[in-house]
């Protein structure tokens, strides 16, 4: 379909642009990864070691900028993102591979919950417009405006330290080993509740307000009036309106997902959750540039993929976009 | 919304983003030359938001002078445990016995300054890019839209972390530089909204007549189009300031900003490093976190109020008489601040 192929082309170009940005930033800035690694090792290093490290990080090349760029593109396409200086000698790809499932699980589930919950609540608030629920809207702006990690601080202090309901961090208890059994799954779930709750509380407010605002506008449309005039029960009228009002929420998904992912990464840091956010912090602390760049690329690709899914859903739901093709 | 361009859309705005909404909801442009009395909105949201925002700005200006202690000074070397609030230290002390209250007062300046700087620069960029691309159309529109879309889908936080990570630590305490970098990643949303509105304005009669009268393009953009976009520019400005607050705080929280350059995010960074949140030292992390949250809430409330000003139908009080009678409430007269009845069909035009 034309619409979708254009979107895919746009995302492919965006991914290419992200790779390009990733390639140029370190070359525009001072500092080099080998220097950072040597500073970390803090030991006597021979010039031979430095040379071999430089070769490993691809810094000794005599290629021109264009040659380096093509080389870099080729590496990225083959999943070769270089070697982490912080987790030396692990490759960036391996470090990310270990962390990615945790983030995908946590952020994926939390985002779906908050989208569904927020949309439903938004419909409710618009339906009961003029009731006390409207007063809850300004209160919601607090959760929207508060940084995710601050809400995470509060959740941790209250529910973990003071009440002791949930563990205070990590993704599973120390001493347990990943296994496919019920007790391990329960343990993982127990550790995921607080971070997921933080993400849901912070991101749902946006969906509620967004859905409510579109819903209020939709409820004024003629077809809603017709449905009411026909004497349909209020529940069904709201259902008709909601199906139309949800479209902008889905296309707005692409705007929100970047914020949610960013917030989720910071939430992971507070909870020492072993996902991308946590290794991002390690990368920052260690000045682990290859890992930083690798995480940037992976997060960008993930966000682009989420956008593409939202676009597909949109085309699936709105016949008008299909007619265009 | 036509999924093909990702632009030109209706109210696809989650949360407190300014509405990309409906062309007809804009106030009708006043006839040139006639002075129009705009009644400023007086909703409680706007008043509370504005009041709190002004409070924060005053705090940012005078806060560092009010601070009773030097925020970086260790006031006692004998005690290694944060002290709870007392008469001498209203908000207690940190691990190394620095006064939290002084840090809070000092840290406001940098936080507010960076956020507003980012807001101003990003708004200028978004007006420049958005209005130009909407008015000119054609290839320049395609390219500028592409650029805006690129910045829109790119997750800003990891990008900023990479940029700040590579900055030498000396650059980590320069408010101007920080604000500029944040602005570069934050202008795209405003540009998108402004472009959509400009598209709807460019073919209005008064713009057409200015064009026929031989006005130069830049004059038409500056004097005919931009003045009619002011509520949307204001909303997008507030949104970017909010974005700046969050982003700057996040960068400082990650330790990417020199922690001796006091900011609320930097305080949270130090608190997290000493595990204040699992040790029950609430007086250390609660004040800066609440300060950031309330500053953000003030901005979001104000934005909310402007949304309702632009689109009166979002108001809770805008009930029709019929509905009001049914719910048993006293009928609330509709009062359109600018005397224009909104037309309901604008959204569909954008979707075709």
Image (cartoon, rainbow, N blue to C red):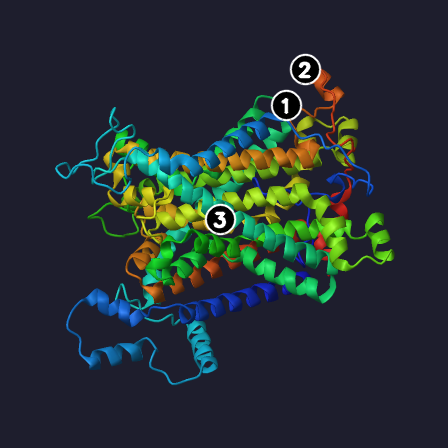
Residue A152 visible to the viewer: no
Residue topped by disc 3:
A259
Observer-nearest of B305 and A305: B305
**Other-residue count near label 1 (Cα within 10 Å), few / some / many at <14 / 14–19 / ≥20:** some
Residue topped by disc 1:
A130
* Disc 2 secondary structure class: loop
Q: Chain of mark 2?
A: B
Q: CA distance from mark 2 to mark 1?
A: 9 Å
On screen, residue A38 versus residue A222, left or right, reads: left
Quarter of the figure with the N terminus of chain A: bottom right
On screen, residue A177 versus residue B184, left or right, reads: left
Q: Is residue A16 above or below residue A188?
A: below
Residue A155 locus on image (x, y percent): 35, 35
Q: Are marks 2 and 1 in contact (CB under 8 Å)?
A: yes
Residue B13 locus on image (x, y percent): 61, 44
Could you say which disc has been placed on residue B34 in the image? Answer: none
Q: Residue at x 60, y 38 (%)?
A: A211
Q: Are marks 1 and 3 on the same chain?
A: yes
Q: CA distance from mark 1 to mark 3?
A: 30 Å
Q: Residue at x 52, y 42 (%)?
A: A115
On screen, residue A113 versus residue A13, left or right, reads: left
Q: Residue at x 87, y 57 (%)?
A: B212
Q: Residue furthest front?
A: B65
Residue topped by disc 2:
B329
Q: Are marks 2 and 3 on the same chain?
A: no
**Other-residue count near label 3 (Cα within 10 Å), few / some / many at <14 / 14–19 / ≥20:** some
On screen, residue A61 versus residue B123, left or right, reads: left
Q: Residue furthest left?
A: B78
Observer-nearest of B145 and B216: B216
How many numbered marks, from 0 up? Answer: 3
């Amino acid at each position: 379909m034309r619409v979708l192929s254009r979107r895919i082309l746009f995302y492919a170009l965006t991914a290419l642009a992200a790779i390009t940005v990733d390639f140029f930033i370190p070359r525009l800035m001072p500092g080099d990864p080998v220097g950072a690694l040597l500073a970390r090792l803090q030991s006597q290093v021979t010039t031979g070691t430095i040379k071999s490290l430089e070769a490993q990080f691809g810094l000794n090349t005599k290629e021109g900028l264009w040659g380096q760029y093509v080389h870099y593109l080729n590496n990225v396409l083959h999943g070769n993102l270089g070697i982490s200086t912080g987790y030396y000698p692990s490759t960036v790809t391996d470090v990310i591979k270990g962390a990615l499932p945790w983030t995908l699980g946590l952020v994926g589930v939390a985002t779906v919950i908050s989208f569904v919950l927020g949309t439903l609540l938004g419909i409710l608030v618009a339906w009961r417009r003029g009731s006390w629920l409207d007063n809850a809207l300004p209160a919601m702006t607090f959760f929207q405006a508060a940084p995710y990690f601050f809400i995470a601080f509060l959740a941790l202090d209250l529910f973990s330290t003071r009440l002791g309901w949930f563990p205070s961090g990590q993704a599973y208890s120390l001493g347990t080993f990943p296994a496919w059994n019920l007790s391990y799954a329960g343990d993982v779930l127990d550790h995921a509740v607080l971070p997921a709750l933080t993400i849901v509380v912070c991101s749902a407010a946006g969906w509620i307000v967004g859905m409510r605002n579109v819903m209020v506008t939709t409820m004024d449309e003629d077809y809603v009036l017709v449905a009411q005039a026909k004497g349909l029960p209020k529940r069904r009228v709201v259902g008709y309106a909601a199906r139309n009002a949800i479209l902008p929420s889905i296309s707005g998904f692409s705007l929100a997902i970047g914020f949610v992912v960013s917030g989720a990464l910071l939430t992971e840091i507070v909870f020492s959750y072993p996902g991308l956010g946590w290794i991002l912090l390690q990368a920052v602390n260690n000045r682990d540039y290859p890992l930083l760049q690798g995480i940037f690329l992976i997060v960008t690709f993930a966000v682009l993929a989420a956008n593409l899914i939202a676009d597909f859903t949109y085309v699936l739901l709105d016949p008008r976009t299909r007619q265009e093709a | 919304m036509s999924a093909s361009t990702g632009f030109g859309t209706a109210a696809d705005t989650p949360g407190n983003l300014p509405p990309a909404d409906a062309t007809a909801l804009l106030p009708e442009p006043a006839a040139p030359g006639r002075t129009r009395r705009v009644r400023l909105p007086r909703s409680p949201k706007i008043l509370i938001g504005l009041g709190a925002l002004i409070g924060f700005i005053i705090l940012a200006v005078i806060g560092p002078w009010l601070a009773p202690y030097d925020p970086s000074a260790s006031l006692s070397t004998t005690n290694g445990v944060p002290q709870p609030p007392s008469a001498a230290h209203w908000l207690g002390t940190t691990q190394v016995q620095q006064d939290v209250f002084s840090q809070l007062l000092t840290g406001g300046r940098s936080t507010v300054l960076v956020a507003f700087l980012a807001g101003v620069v990003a708004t200028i960029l978004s007006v420049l890019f958005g209005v130009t691309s909407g008015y000119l159309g054609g290839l320049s529109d395609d390219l500028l839209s592409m650029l805006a879309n690129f910045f829109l889908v790119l997750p800003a936080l990891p990008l900023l972390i990479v940029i700040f990570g590579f900055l030498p630590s000396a650059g980590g305490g320069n408010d101007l530089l920080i604000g500029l970098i944040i602005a570069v990643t934050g202008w795209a949303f405003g540009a998108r909204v402004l472009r959509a509105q400009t598209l709807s304005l460019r073919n209005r009669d008064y713009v057409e007549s200015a064009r026929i009268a031989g006005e130069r393009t830049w004059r038409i953009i500056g004097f005919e189009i931009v003045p009619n976009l002011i509520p949307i520019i204001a909303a997008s400005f507030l949104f970017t300031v909010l974005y700046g607050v969050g982003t700057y705080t996040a960068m400082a929280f990650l330790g990417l900003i020199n922690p001796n350059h006091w900011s609320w995010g930097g305080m949270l960074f130090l608190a997290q490093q000493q595990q204040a949140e699992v040790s029950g030292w609430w007086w250390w992390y609660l004040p800066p976190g609440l300060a950031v949250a309330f500053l953000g809430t003030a901005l979001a409330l104000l934005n909310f109020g402007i949304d309702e000003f632009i689109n009166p139908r979002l108001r809770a009080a805008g009930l029709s008489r019929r509905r009001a009678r049914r719910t048993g409430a006293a009928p609330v007269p509709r009062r359109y601040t600018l005397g224009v009845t909104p037309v309901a069909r604008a959204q569909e035009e954008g979707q075709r």
